[in-house]
């Protein structure tokens, strides 16, 4: 549903800010199509919209912001589109990282890096190393990421440890399993936002969203601003979270 004005009460004084917000950034292609532009222009404007989300997260006091930038399934898109997306990523890692570092933002990339180019992997390592001690906001980019693959790889890692005698499988806990996920050390998201009106997860953080709140907005990602982010946080503050327990 859209963020209707009736849902947002300007007199609401709640300070229940989500610690971690994750966003499925959807709608770049439709944004471009509506303007008779190439899909590459939609992706370019979508990359620019990331700045607004970061500003919105910082303004709201959010500690972690995760952005679903490129899924494992996106590799099946036309080669030209994949190339455009990788080019934007390289540009972002070289042009924006110094600004993010100056503003106290830590960058962390999650996902399977095997299919990324050596140049991109090198840029990721440099960016993560440069920003590792920043604490204003942790920006998590899900890149070449698929949650089923993540869970499968974690299960394989647990099986290897059990076979080697390093883990008693009967004593396996959720916390131990979580250590094998890409998101180890990152709190589960409190709020999941998906833009463009679509209402599905698309293989995103399936383990981590067990008790997340969901918000589906009609705004296409290139049009998403820090004001949209602030409105989403206000809606979140009105939610009652029970974690499966009756009040």
Image (tube, rainbow, N blue to C red):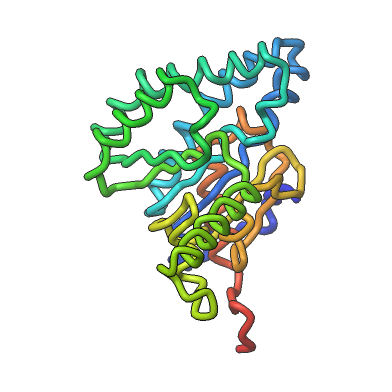
Name the residue at the bottom extreme: 247
Quadrant of residue 79 in the image?
A: top right
- The residue lying at 67 percent from left, 41 percent from top is 195
Expressed as whole percent of the image width and height from the top left, the position of residue 53 reads 48, 39
Expressed as whole percent of the image width and height from the top left, the position of residue 242 reads 60, 79
Quadrant of residue 131 in the image?
A: top left
Is 157 placed left or right of 102 in the picture?
right
Q: Is residue 45 above or below residue 134?
A: above
Name the residue at the front extreme: 164
Q: From where the camera sits, is residue 23 visible?
A: yes
Expressed as whole percent of the image width and height from the top left, the position of residue 107 reads 36, 39
Expressed as whole percent of the image width and height from the top left, the position of residue 186 reads 42, 56
- The residue lying at 63 percent from left, 14 percent from top is 41
Q: Is residue 222 above or below residue 211?
A: above
- The residue lying at 57 percent from left, 34 percent from top is 144
Image label count: 0
Q: From where the camera sits, is residue 9 visible?
A: no
- The residue lying at 68 percent from left, 47 percent from top is 203
Is 210 placed left or right of 87 in the picture?
right
Nearer to the camera, 209 or 33: 209
Split into 4 quadrants, where in the image is the C terminus?
bottom right
Nearer to the camera, 92 or 159: 159
Quadrant of residue 244 in the image?
A: bottom right
């Amino acid at each position: 549903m859209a963020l209707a004005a009736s849902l947002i009460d300007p007199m609401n004084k709640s300070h229940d800010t989500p610690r971690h917000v994750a966003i499925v950034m959807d709608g770049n292609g439709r944004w471009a199509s509506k303007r008779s532009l190439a899909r590459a222009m939609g992706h370019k404007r979508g990359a620019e919209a990331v700045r607004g989300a970061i500003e919105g997260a910082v303004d709201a006091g959010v500690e972690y912001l995760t952005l679903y930038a490129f899924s494992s399934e996106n590799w099946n898109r036309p080669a030209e589109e994949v190339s455009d997306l990788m080019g934007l990523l390289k540009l972002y890692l070289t042009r924006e990282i110094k600004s993010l570092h100056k503003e106290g933002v830590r960058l962390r990339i999650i996902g399977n890096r095997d299919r990324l180019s050596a140049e991109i992997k090198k840029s990721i390592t440099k960016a993560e190393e440069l920003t590792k001690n920043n604490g204003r906001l942790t920006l998590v980019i899900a890149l070449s990421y698929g949650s089923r693959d993540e869970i499968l790889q974690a299960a394989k890692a647990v099986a290897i440890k059990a076979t080697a005698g390093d883990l008693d499988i009967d004593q396996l806990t959720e916390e131990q399993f979580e250590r094998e996920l890409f998101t180890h050390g990152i709190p589960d998201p409190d709020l999941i936002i998906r833009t463009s009106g679509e209402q599905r997860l698309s293989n995103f953080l399936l383990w981590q969203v067990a008790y997340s709140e969901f918000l589906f907005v009609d705004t296409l990602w290139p049009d998403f601003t820090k004001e949209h982010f602030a409105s989403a946080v206000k809606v979140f503050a009105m939610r009652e979270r029970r974690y499966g327990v009756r009040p």
